[in-house]
Image (tube, rainbow, N blue to C red):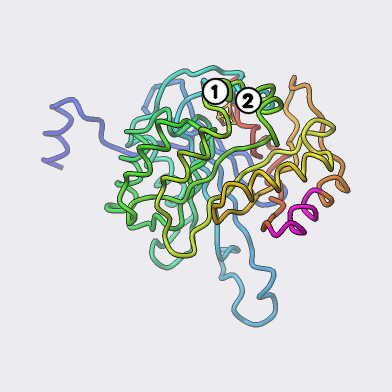
């Protein structure tokens, strides 16, 4: 207590971010508005996604009384975002401010506390894919990773950071020590520069080839793969020819890679449509046939606007 008082007297804030509001999805996902500073009306969004392990059902080793045996926490790095991806609700906020390292790590701690997670025993993954572009808040993001690894005891190998392709950020990331570096995901979302620039204007500044060049400089751990995230927009990026183009693009990188396909999640006022399920399946099959591991990410918490691209403080707005 004496130390706390001393720190407060020096102007530090002591405490953990508070969950100001929680929304519960029918699929078990929870979306939180996290208040980082007492009295601050600004909140960021953090998402908890419990995943029961269906493969072990009935063999006696399934989830304990908590009802989940592994979970993923999706963490925000900024309030709003400046990147302006056309399919993303967070982009509509613009960038309001960067989160501090304490605020980024604090979201995780608040959620772990809420669910009674036993660090070191429960399987928890972190994805830095919430609001914001982590590589445009690089120092705070990496300081948060160091806090989570050194002070909380989480493994960086269970963390993934996703970037829209901020080349200077990827170059810095390549210099991070391997025992402190999360895995890397690139938010690709289009098969070529023309289409990518249309839906992600950041591509004008750092086109696909520049992003891939930077990714090649990240030294990978044994068996580590780069993830390419690909949001399928109905009629825009989900056509068979796009799948072939993505396959050859990923093959040409020469990187050990996989592709995560995400059927676009609707958001109010965003002028795209969901892809048809057969188009999603066909896209995956084309990639697999080309020898590229491809997974369809199941949307989580769509009903509470917790799914990819849907985070926008709907409580306040
Ligand atoms: S998808 Fe990510 S990088 Fe793009 S605008 Fe949304 S939050 Fe920002």
Residue 168 percent across, percent down from the top left: 40, 30
Residue at x 69% of width, y 55% of height: 294
Direction from residue 145 to residue 116 in the image, left or right = right
Secondary structure at numbered mark 2: loop
Q: Which of 163 and 203 is in front in this view?
A: 203
Residue that badge 2 annotates? 200
> Magenta segment, which residues?
283-291
Q: In which quarter of the image is ligand 1?
A: top right
Identify the residue at image location x=74%, y=23%.
268
Query: Which circle's residue, 1 or 2, is located before the other in the chain?
Result: 1
Task: Report the label total.
Answer: 2
Which quadrant holds the C terminus? top right
Confirm or deny contact between disc 1 and disc 2 (CB under 8 A): yes
Q: Does the residue labelled 2 lie within 8 Å of ligand 1?
A: yes
Query: Is residue 303 one of those drawn in magenta?
Result: no
The residue at 46%/22% (across/down) is: 42
Characterize the magenta stretch by its predominant secondary structure.
Answer: helix
What residue is shown at x 41% (from left), y 47% (from top)?
218
**Residue 84: x, y in percent?**
59, 21
Residue 1 is drawn in which quadrant? Answer: top left
């Amino acid at each position: 207590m004496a130390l706390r008082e001393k720190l407060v007297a020096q102007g530090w804030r002591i405490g953990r971010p508070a969950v100001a509001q929680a929304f519960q999805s029918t699929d078990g996902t929870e979306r939180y508005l996290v208040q980082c500073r007492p009295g601050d009306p600004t909140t960021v969004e953090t998402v908890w996604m419990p995943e029961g392990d269906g493969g072990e059902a009935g063999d006696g080793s399934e989830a304990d009384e908590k009802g989940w045996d592994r979970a993923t926490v999706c963490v925000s790095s900024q309030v709003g975002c400046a990147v302006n991806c056309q399919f993303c609700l967070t982009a509509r906020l613009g960038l309001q401010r960067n989160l501090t390292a304490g605020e980024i790590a604090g979201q995780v701690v608040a959620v772990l506390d809420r669910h009674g997670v036993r660090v070191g025993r429960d399987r928890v993954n972190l994805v830095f894919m919430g609001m914001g572009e982590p590589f445009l808040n690089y120092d705070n993001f990496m300081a948060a990773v160091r806090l989570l690894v050194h002070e909380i005891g989480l493994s960086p190998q269970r963390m993934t950071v996703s970037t829209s392709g901020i080349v200077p950020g990827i170059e810095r990331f390549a210099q991070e020590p391997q025992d402190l570096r999360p895995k890397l995901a690139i938010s690709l979302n289009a098969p070529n520069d023309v289409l990518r620039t249309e839906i992600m204007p950041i591509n004008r500044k750092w086109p696909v080839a520049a992003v891939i060049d930077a990714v090649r400089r990240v030294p990978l751990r044994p068996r580590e793969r780069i993830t390419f995230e690909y949001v399928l927009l109905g009629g825009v990026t989900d056509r068979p020819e796009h799948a072939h183009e993505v396959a050859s693009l990923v093959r040409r990188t020469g990187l050990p890679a996989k592709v995560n396909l995400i059927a676009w999640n609707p958001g109010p006022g965003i002028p795209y449509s969901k892809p048809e399920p057969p188009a999603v399946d066909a896209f995956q099959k084309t990639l697999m046939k080309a020898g590229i591991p491809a997974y369809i990410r199941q949307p989580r918490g769509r009903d509470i606007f917790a799914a990819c691209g849907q985070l926008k403080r709907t409580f306040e707005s």
